[in-house]
Amino acid sequence: MGKITGNNNINVDGNHNNVNINHYGAEKIKTIVEDHQHDSDIHLTTDQQFTLSEEIKKIADMMDGIDGINYYQKIFGLLKKKFKVPKYSLIKQSNFNEAVKYIKAQKNIYRRKIRSYNATKFKEITIPLIIIRWKYLGRDDNELILFASEKLCKKITDIKKLSANDIDTLYDRVYYLKK
C-alpha cells in the first residue's frame, strides 16, 4: 500500500506499519526525564537524613576490620535498593520510620555476623545492648543475672563470663520481653 494523498497530514507506510503524523511547523521531540531533585516537602528532611546516616555509621564502625567490606557503602546501597531510589535522600518522609527499622534490622544481622569472626568483639557489642534494653524495661541490674540463670538453665554470676552463644541467646530473650 502506498501513501494516502490529501493534505499530507497523515502518511501510512504499509510495508513497515509506520504511521507518521505531520504537524504544521517543526517536529517536537518529547523526552521523558526522571526527576532526581530533592523536594523538601516529600523527601527526607536533613535531620532525617542525618539520623539514617548516623545509624548506618554505627553499623560501619561496628563492622570495621571484620572482613574488609565497606559497610557504610553497603548499607546505603541496601537502603537505596529497598526503597528503589538512586539517592537515599530521595526516600519519602512517610517511609522514614520504615527506613530506621530496616537499618536496625541490618544492625542486628551484622552484629550476629561478628560472632563468627570475633567472639570477643561480639560480646563487647552485645552485652551493653542487653543492659540498655534491660534498663529500658525498668528492671533492676541484679534481676538480669537471675533472669539469665533461669533462661540459660545455668548458674550465672557474671554476664561477661558467658560464651558468645549464651550472650546471643540472652540478647534474644531480653529483646522479646515487653515493657
Image (cartoon, rainbow, N blue to C red):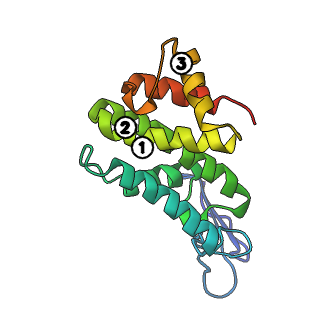
Residue that label 2 marks: 122
Secondary structure at badge 2 equals helix
The residue shown at (54%, 38%) is 130
The mark lying in front, picked from 3 and 1, is 3
Neighbour class for label 3 at 10 Å: few (<14), some, many (≥20)? some
Label whose residue precedes the other's in the sequence (3 or 1): 1
**Would you say the residues marked 2 and 1 are in contact, meaning their CB atoms lie under 8 Å apart?**
yes
Secondary structure at badge 3 equals helix
Per the rendering, the mark at residue 81 is: none
Amino acid type at image mark 3:
Ser
- Residues 93 and 104: in front is 104
Q: Is residue 65 left or right of residue 48?
A: left
Neighbour class for label 2 at 10 Å: few (<14), some, many (≥20)? many
Label whose residue precedes the other's in the sequence (2 or 3): 2
- Decide: is 156 above or below 134: above
The residue shown at (60%, 81%) is 27
Amino acid type at image mark 2:
Phe
- Residues 78 and 171: in front is 171
Residue that label 1 marks: 125
The residue shown at (49%, 44%) is 128
Q: How far apart are marks 3 and 1 (CA)?
A: 21 Å
Give x and y (percent) for residue 99.
61, 52
Give x and y (percent) for residue 91.
62, 61
Q: Distance between the residues labelled 2 and 3?
A: 20 Å
